[in-house]
Image (cartoon, grey):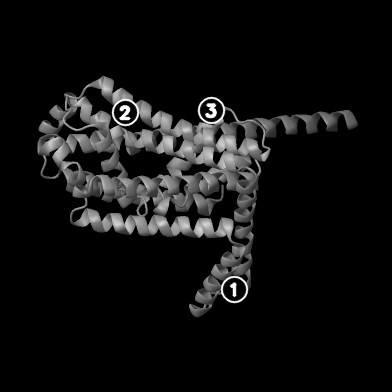
């Protein structure tokens, strides 16, 4: 990995940590920390364990989906552990970069390091992302119709913004996948805008856009020839997201509460996720906590709300940022060790060859 990339990652990580510190300061500055600790201690560990298990299923489903698509493309079978490793690496870099922009490129980077085709890896992740956007938007729209009472004040405007951002991203992806003519028009529009802002190296910029277009065209070919696989991929993503959205419900049950049912929590979490997922903040830190405190006030009550947010967000995000960071570090150490051992072996062989030649 280049030194400039490492420095950029370090800056992103520092900004991410600062954002977390600021968020927790403002969320808990007026909170009685002793009371908060008592609330956390009162939670039922069985339900908390189920919530954590939901997140493991979430990561497993994503890794299985990508592995399955890669296999259909003709790649050799990838082990479960390698698949989960790629997913966790993607999660970590998505968490520390704005708009989750670093996740997929780093997954592709590590897949390529393990000998997987860049083109096939890109297409597999693109199809996964496309399915994720379809399911996220669909669940949010359905949830808004089921529970319109949640759409009050800032939540309504944030949901509209989230749907517009996610919907725009999905529309661009679908255009690029299914319509070559519209894609060419889109590229020409981007080039005109770039020229208007006097961007340098326009021809190189245009070539990068056209090269990027190729992966979408290949994805369209996959979808046309494997329609059933594409539908299955979307259904697997749906299952993945439902497990993710289930975490607040089990946190709720861990406090001994049962007035609200599972579907109500599923709709609340679907709306929360859509309001924050399109915003350009690393891991949606700050905004996720704020919207949680707004949407779930009636469900948990003021006394338990802070603890509920801490547990729910801790399980769905902070715990797995820590786990994925460990995976990234271990993977880097193992790779360096293997390379170092190979260098020693090569040097030893070369020395023996020199002795024999002498």
- Of helix, strand and loop, which one carries label 3? helix
The one nearer the camera, 154 or 225, is 225
Left-right relation of 64 to 245: right
Q: Is residue 211 above or below residue 188?
A: above
First reached walking from the N terminus: tag 2 or tag 1: 2
Q: Residues within 10 Å of mark 2 (few under 14, many from 20)?
A: many
First reached walking from the N terminus: tag 1 or tag 3: 3
Write down the quadrant of residue 75 in the picture. Answer: top right
- Residue, disc 1: 202
Q: CA distance from mark 3 to mark 2?
A: 21 Å
Q: CA distance from mark 1 to mark 3?
A: 42 Å
- Give me the residue at 34% from left, 34% from top: 319
First reached walking from the N terminus: tag 3 or tag 2: 2
- Residue, disc 2: 51
Q: Position of residue 287 (x, y in %)?
A: 27, 51
Q: Position of residue 105 (x, y in %)?
A: 53, 49
Q: CA distance from mark 2 to mark 1?
A: 50 Å
- Give me the residue at 47% from left, 38% from top: 235
Left-right relation of 343 to 199: right
- Give me the residue at 26% from left, 42% from top: 268
Left-right relation of 324 to 122: left
Q: Residues within 10 Å of mark 3 (few under 14, many from 20)?
A: few
**Can residue 318 be seen by looking at this rendering?**
yes
- Of helix, strand and loop, which one carries label 2? helix
**Can residue 288 be seen by looking at this rendering?**
no
The one nearer the camera, 22 or 287, is 287
Foreground: disc 3 or disc 2: 2
Which mark is on residue 81?
A: 3
């Amino acid at each position: 990995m280049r030194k400039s990339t490492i420095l950029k990652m370090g800056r992103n990580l520092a900004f991410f940590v600062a954002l977390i510190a600021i968020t927790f300061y403002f969320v808990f500055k007026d909170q009685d920390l002793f009371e908060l600790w008592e609330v956390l201690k009162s939670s039922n560990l069985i339900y908390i364990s189920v919530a954590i298990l939901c997140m493991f299923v979430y990561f497993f489903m994503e890794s299985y989906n990508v592995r399955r698509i890669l296999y259909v493309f003709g790649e050799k079978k990838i082990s479960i552990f390698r698949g989960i490793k790629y997913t966790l690496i993607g999660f970590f870099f998505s968490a520390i970069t704005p708009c989750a922009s670093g996740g997929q490129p780093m997954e592709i980077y590590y897949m390529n390091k393990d000998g997987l085709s860049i083109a096939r890896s890109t297409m597999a992740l693109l199809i996964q992302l496309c399915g994720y956007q379809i399911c996220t938007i669909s669940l949010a729209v359905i949830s808004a119709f089921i529970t319109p009472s949640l759409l009050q004040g800032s939540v309504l405007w944030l949901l509209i913004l989230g749907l517009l951002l996610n919907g725009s991203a999905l529309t661009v992806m679908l255009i690029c996948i299914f319509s070559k003519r519209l894609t060419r028009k889109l590229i020409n529009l981007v080039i005109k805008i770039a020229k208007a802002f006097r961007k340098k190296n326009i021809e190189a910029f245009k070539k990068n856009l056209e090269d990027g277009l190729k992966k979408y065209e290949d994805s369209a070919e996959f979808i046309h020839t494997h329609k059933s696989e594409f539908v299955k991929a979307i259904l697997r993503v749906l299952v993945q997201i439902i497990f993710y959205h289930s975490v607040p419900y089990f946190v709720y049950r861990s406090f001994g509460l049962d007035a609200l049912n599972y579907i109500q929590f599923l709709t609340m979490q679907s709306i929360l996720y859509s309001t924050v997922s399109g915003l350009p903040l690393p891991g949606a830190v700050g905004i996720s906590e704020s919207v949680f405190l707004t949407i779930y006030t009636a469900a948990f009550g003021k006394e338990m709300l802070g603890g509920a947010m801490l547990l729910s967000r801790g399980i769905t995000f902070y715990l797995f940022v820590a786990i994925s960071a460990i995976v990234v570090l271990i993977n880097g150490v193992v790779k360096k060790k293997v390379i170092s051992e190979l260098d020693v072996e090569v040097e030893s062989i070369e020395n023996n060859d020199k002795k024999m030649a002498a």
